[in-house]
Image (cartoon, rainbow, N blue to C red):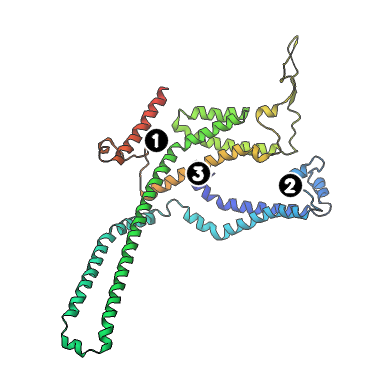
């Protein structure tokens, strides 16, 4: 749902957390009560869940009479999810919805950006003025002392004669150290602001490049998954999606959503297929000979054996389920990253009041008239022309 609609995903989060809480509580109660005496018989008699064909085991119902450690681990997972979900729903859900709103930080972000820009321009003049004033005071102080009359010096006590120059010297050194500290601090602040501005500019360019080319990563990952595990369900879905989506940029987002649904369905189906309740005997066929109208033809090796059509479709039984499903998990991760990039760019444009750039353009502000101003603008217009050149070459080939 996060990949389809960000707003709808935010709206159903409360119901999702409630579902997780209820489901975790049911799992805890069922696993714990199943350890009681004769509860396996009750499941078989009243709920018609047989124990002989491992239907109860497929549901996660096992007896741990002599292995309390394993029972504790089995109960720990739903307990952990239950506690974490309750904490999230009770303490952080409202704040999460507030912070995750697209329009939450638009005005605040612009105000902070303006304040930061203004502050970065002010310190140079104020620093020079402050240092100049302090320097003038430092120069004028000795002159004021020299204008004092000799008689007044003689009438002063020995303590004042010895203490005043020392105190004045310490004060001057203290002011000088304070000025140097402030100058260093302002210099470091300016350097930090420059580095922050440079990092922001680079990150925005990288986000834009990722926004343009993430669909290519999705299509490439999909094709690699189809080539890694050759079967019917991959060809009729993934290969067809990739071949059709490449020349049609307007439909690439739609095909991306279709692939998200298909990957989720395949992942759940292949996990369900590992259960013992799934009967895979009816799909086996003996291919040692093919009967025609009046004759039979023998198949050569390795086709002259009993073949399971589930393998041809794409369903296999395995003991390493994580390795078996890693391709689907990786593709779901890539599709999620695509959704994150899309939402992030949308939020950033709303905050900065920026228009939607043209498709495939990294620097929309780059034009031919400004290409000769400096090297930066020259490279920007080169990147823009490079895209159109590659696009033309793609159409030609």
Left or right of 80 in this view: 7: left
Earlier along the polypeptide chain: callout 2 or callout 1?
Answer: 2
Q: Are marks 3 and 2 in contact (CB under 8 Å)?
A: no
Residue at 42%, 43% in the rendered image: 206
Residue at 65%, 53% in the rendered image: 22
On the image, numbered disc 3 is attached to which residue?
5
> In front of the other: label 3 or label 2?
2
| Residue 252 vertical position relative to residue 101 in the rendered view, above or below | above
Left or right of 68 in this view: 234: left
Q: Measured from the top left, where is residue 260 in percent x and y?
A: 55, 38
How many marks can you see?
3
Q: Measured from the top left, where is residue 289 in percent x and y?
A: 75, 16
Q: Measured from the top left, where is residue 235 in percent x and y?
A: 59, 27
Taking the image as drawn, is residue 264 in sight?
Answer: no
Earlier along the polypeptide chain: callout 3 or callout 1?
Answer: 3
On the image, numbered disc 1 is attached to which residue?
360
Residue located farthest toward the top when viewing the structure as drawn: 294
Earlier along the polypeptide chain: callout 3 or callout 2?
Answer: 3
> In front of the other: label 3 or label 1?
1
| Residue 265 vertical position relative to residue 121 in the rendered view, above or below | above
- Residue 225's disc number: none
On the image, numbered disc 2 is attached to which residue?
60
Q: Quadrant of the C terminus?
A: top left
Q: Quadrant of the N terminus?
A: top right
Q: CA distance from mark 3 to mark 1?
A: 23 Å
Q: Residues within 10 Å of mark 1 (few under 14, many from 20)?
A: some
In the structure shown, which secondary structural element does the residue marked by tag 1 occupy?
loop
In the structure shown, which secondary structural element does the residue marked by tag 2 occupy?
loop
Q: Nearer the viewer, residue 319 or 277?
A: 319
């Amino acid at each position: 749902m996060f990949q389809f609609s960000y707003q709808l995903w935010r709206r159903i989060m409360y119901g999702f957390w409630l579902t997780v809480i209820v489901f975790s509580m049911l799992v805890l109660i069922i696993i714990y009560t199943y350890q009681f005496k004769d509860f396996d018989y009750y499941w078989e008699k009243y709920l018609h869940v047989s124990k002989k064909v491992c239907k109860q085991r497929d549901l996660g119902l096992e007896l741990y009479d002599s292995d309390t450690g394993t029972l504790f681990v089995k109960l720990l997972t739903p307990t952990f999810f239950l506690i974490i979900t309750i904490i999230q729903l009770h303490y952080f859900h409202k704040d999460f919805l507030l912070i995750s709103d697209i329009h939450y930080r638009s005005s605040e972000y612009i105000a902070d950006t303006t304040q930061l820009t203004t502050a970065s321009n002010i310190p140079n003049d104020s620093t020079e003025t402050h240092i100049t004033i302090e320097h003038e005071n430092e120069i004028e102080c000795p002159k004021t002392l020299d204008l004092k009359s000799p008689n007044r010096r003689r009438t002063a006590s020995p303590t004042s004669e010895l203490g005043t120059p020392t105190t004045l010297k310490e004060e001057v050194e203290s002011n000088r150290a304070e000025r140097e500290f402030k100058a260093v601090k302002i210099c470091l602040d300016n350097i930090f602001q420059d580095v922050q501005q440079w990092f922001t500019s680079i990150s925005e360019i990288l986000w834009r490049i990722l926004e343009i080319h993430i669909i290519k990563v999705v299509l490439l990952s999909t094709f690699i998954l189809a080539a890694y595990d050759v079967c019917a369900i991959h060809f009729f879905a993934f290969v067809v999606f990739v071949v059709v989506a490449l020349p049609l940029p307007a439909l690439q987002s739609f095909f991306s959503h279709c692939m998200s649904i298909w990957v989720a369905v395949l992942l759940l189906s292949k996990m369900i297929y590992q259960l013992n309740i799934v009967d895979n005997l009816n799909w086996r066929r003996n291919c040692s000979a093919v009967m025609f109208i009046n004759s039979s033809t023998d198949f050569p090796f390795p086709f002259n054996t009993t073949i399971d059509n589930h393998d041809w479709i794409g369903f296999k039984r395995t003991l390493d389920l994580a390795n078996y499903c890693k391709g689907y998990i990786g593709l779901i991760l890539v599709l999620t990253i695509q959704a994150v990039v899309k939402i992030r760019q949308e939020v950033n444009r709303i905050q900065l009041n920026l228009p939607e750039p043209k498709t495939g353009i990294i620097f929309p502000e780059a034009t031919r008239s400004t290409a000769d101003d400096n090297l930066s603008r020259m490279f920007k217009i080169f990147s823009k022309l490079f895209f159109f050149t590659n696009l033309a070459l793609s159409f030609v080939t």
